[in-house]
Image (spheres, helix red, strand yellow):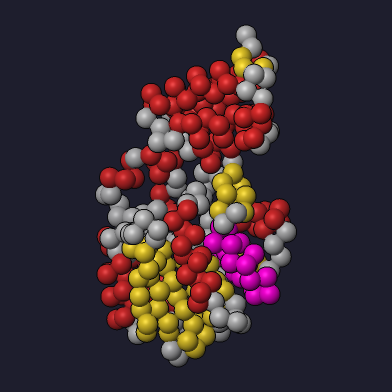
Amino acid sequence: MSQTLDAALKAAISQLEASGSDSPSLDAAVLLCHTLDKPRSYLLTWPDKLLNQDQLTQFNQLIERRVQGEPVAYIIGEREFWSLPLKVSPSTLIPRPDTERLVEVALEKAGEQGAILDLGTGTGAIALALASELPHREVVGIDLQPQAQQLATSNAERLNITNVTFLHGSWFEPLQSGTKFALIVSNPPYIEKNDPHLTQGDVRFEPLTALVAEDNGLADIKYISQEARAFLTDQGWLAFEHGYDQGEAVRSIMINLGYHQVATVQDYAGQDRVTLGQFQQ
């Protein structure tokens, strides 16, 4: 049985509303566009166009996956970040708009020269955003998961961003001794293991290794802050994304390790989101 785009969309929105989706209209539209391989404008221009049976079956299957809570980004395999269309997979976190605040802060502190390092790069979102804005700078991204390193590399190739390299390993491990960076950024695991948010929404489907850290979510931030000092140029900057309630703790960690000009920056919702500091050799 055939169905118009408009009718299919309305039925899907009703299903998603009943399932408790936060954005049923957007989710339905994105999944229908993915099914049709068409832009959003197509749905507005051709609301009475009929879906064939194969298209309708595929769309209904995608909607059912979303009803079960699977993130839209994993369903379609893509998420936009910093206006870059990035391929994503269940082996990586889904890039979020809040993380663009870290990119903005990093660009303010990047200076005119020196390499840039992104630790725990995942899809490569932060590294690729910085590399796209600073095409004459060398950018390196590192991730513990080989699947993430491969995905980030393929994103760079697909976007034709050539001044970025992605390495596989634990934090600074793949780097040669003596390697220096003018800027190190990271969106590390920072959620405490008993945080109730881990059982809610899209986070349920994301890899725990990219989300959870020991020591009330601060273990990786402490480790990176300590080790980064050996890899920063004189007056180089270190910047973290972290939880909304961790600003004071992260500032304390960095100040105690000798960083200067330590400050916390809020996101556009007014929540503490990024803490940064400068290290003097």
Kindly identify the residue that appears in the image at 47 percent across and 52 percent down: 96
Residue 136 colored in magenta in the image = yes
Residue 177, visible in the rendered structure: no
Kindly identify the residue that appears in the image at 38 percent across and 39 percent down: 201
Up the image or down, 214 lies above or below 62; here it is: below
Kindly identify the residue that appears in the image at 60 percent across and 82 percent down: 112
Looking at the image, the residue that sits furthest to the bottom is 281
Q: Is the C terminus in the top left, top right, bottom left or bottom right quadrant?
A: bottom left
Left or right: where 96 falls relative to 125: left
Locate residue 237, reporting x and y percent: 47, 79
Locate residue 172, reporting x and y percent: 50, 72
Q: Nearer the viewer, residue 101 or 225?
A: 101
Q: Which residues are magenta?
A: 123-142
Q: Nearer the viewer, residue 13 or 250?
A: 13
Up the image or down, 70 lies above or below 148; here it is: above
Residue 59 colored in magenta in the image = no
Left or right: where 218 falls relative to 236: left
Locate residue 87, reporting x and y percent: 61, 47
Kindly identify the residue that appears in the image at 57 percent across and 74 percent down: 116
